[in-house]
Amino acid sequence: MIKTVDVIIIGAGASGLMCAIEAAKRGRSVLILDHANKAGKKILMSGGGRCNFANYTVEAENYLSENVHFCKSALSRFTQWDFLAMVQTYEIPYHEREHGQLFCNETARDILNMLLDECHKVKVKIQLKMAVKRIKQEEGELFSVQTETESLLCESLVIATGGLSIPKMGATPFGYKIAEQFGINVTTTKAGLVPFTWQETDKQKFAVLSGLALPAQITYQEYSFTENLLFTHRGLSGPVALQISSYWQLGESLTLDLLPMLDLHECLLNAQVGQVKLKLRNFLTQHLPKKLIPLLIEDELLERFILDLSYKQIALVTENIKNWQIKPNGTEGYRTAEATVGGVNCNEISSKTLQANQITGLYFIGEVLDVTGWLGGYNFQWAWASGWCAGQYV
């Protein structure tokens, strides 16, 4: 027998759960299908198990997309304050970290339990370990969804399957394949919010720095971030590297400023004027980790007294530290990426309803779309907002 429901949502992640709650509040019968064995797996693992669920400051500028205006509508209709109101209703303890990032005090499970509780209240059905085998649109515009065990019909079909990041958590290209099946374009995808890997020669040279962290600014084209940088045995990580990785293109160089809060050139000139009797090495050790310095500046120069440095040498030292050029070999890819850049083309989706422009009843929400947030709770806010907005229409 074919079972009919009003709304089928494929994907029991952040956006899918939010959409289900809102649709069911309107009296729609809602079924969520997910091939995973648990709902909200990425919620549980995010933020080191504390879930960076939102940010105090959310702007369109915090997102990448080929359609830079697309995210504005949803983000303005369901804001970080709206989600925070839910969190506060459930009395979930949370705290703010740097840059307005909001984390659970105790565990990410608090956020997931809140969403599952809301689903339960409005009678959302969730079927896990349920792979979808086939989808097609029948005459009369109903969608038929074939799983391993049953045939389903629905008026509204919501694709909330996420991107390609962290395949061990169950990420697949399923959502992109459904878009293409219905003639909807998918923009080129790549790993975002992901560590960089060294070129082979740099890997040997910088191996000694593994585990070292310091504040840095990384610039690529017109994009620039200043946060902590972490050297690993594979390459460069830490928040500043992850942020710029979403913009970076393979084969291009990055510019690193390892003393972003210091005008090193002026500092060295002032030291000369002040007759500071220090070798360059000792001077730089006051500002940078000791083992990093000889990898940036030649030993011969480091042994010189600051007073003996020529203007040209001061410029060279400044350039090497404040304008360090690195060409990564690549990134660690989807295996460790926190997001997928690219996805279902937003020009073919309504920014108001999240429905496909040419296919009545087919919706795309969350990370499957070509909307990628910065590190810091922005991707979850996009999931909540896009899910909430679609939930008003499905």
Image (cartoon, helix red, strand yellow):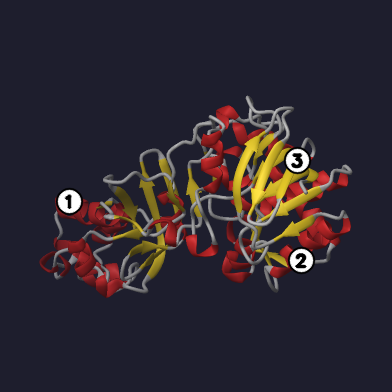
User: Where 305 sits versus 252, above or below?
Assistant: below
- Residue at label 2? 113
Observer-side mark, 3 or 1, equals: 3
**Residue 209 point in image, percent of width and height:** 30, 72
Is 189 or 105 nearer to us in this picture? 189
Is 288 or 190 nearer to us in this picture? 190
Left or right placement of residue 130 versus residue 265 in this view: right
Q: Quadrant of residue 283?
A: bottom left
Q: Quadrant of residue 305?
A: bottom left
Observer-side mark, 1 or 2, equals: 2
Q: Which amino acid, mark 3? A: Cys
Q: Residues within 10 Å of mark 3 (few under 14, many from 20)?
A: many
- Residue at label 1? 311
Q: Which amino acid, mark 1? A: Tyr
In whole angstroms, how far apart are the C-alphas of marks 3 and 1? 74 Å
**Residue 230 point in image, percent of width and height:** 39, 66
Q: Quadrant of residue 27?
A: top right
Residue at x 64%, y 30% (from the top left corner)? 356
In whole angstroms, how far apart are the C-alphas of marks 1 and 2? 62 Å
Left or right placement of residue 314 versus residue 215 in this view: left
Q: Secondary structure at mark 1?
A: helix
Does the image show residue 81? Answer: no
Does the image show residue 10? Answer: yes
Q: Are marks 3 and 1 in contact (CB under 8 Å)?
A: no
Mark before the other along the chain sequence, 1 or 2 = 2
Left or right placement of residue 179 versus residue 334 in this view: right
Q: Which amino acid, mark 2? A: Asn
Observer-side mark, 3 or 2, equals: 3
- Residue at label 3? 154
**Residue 284 point in image, percent of width and height:** 28, 67
Q: Residues within 10 Å of mark 1 (few under 14, many from 20)?
A: few
Residue at x 17%, y 63% (from the top left corner)? 201
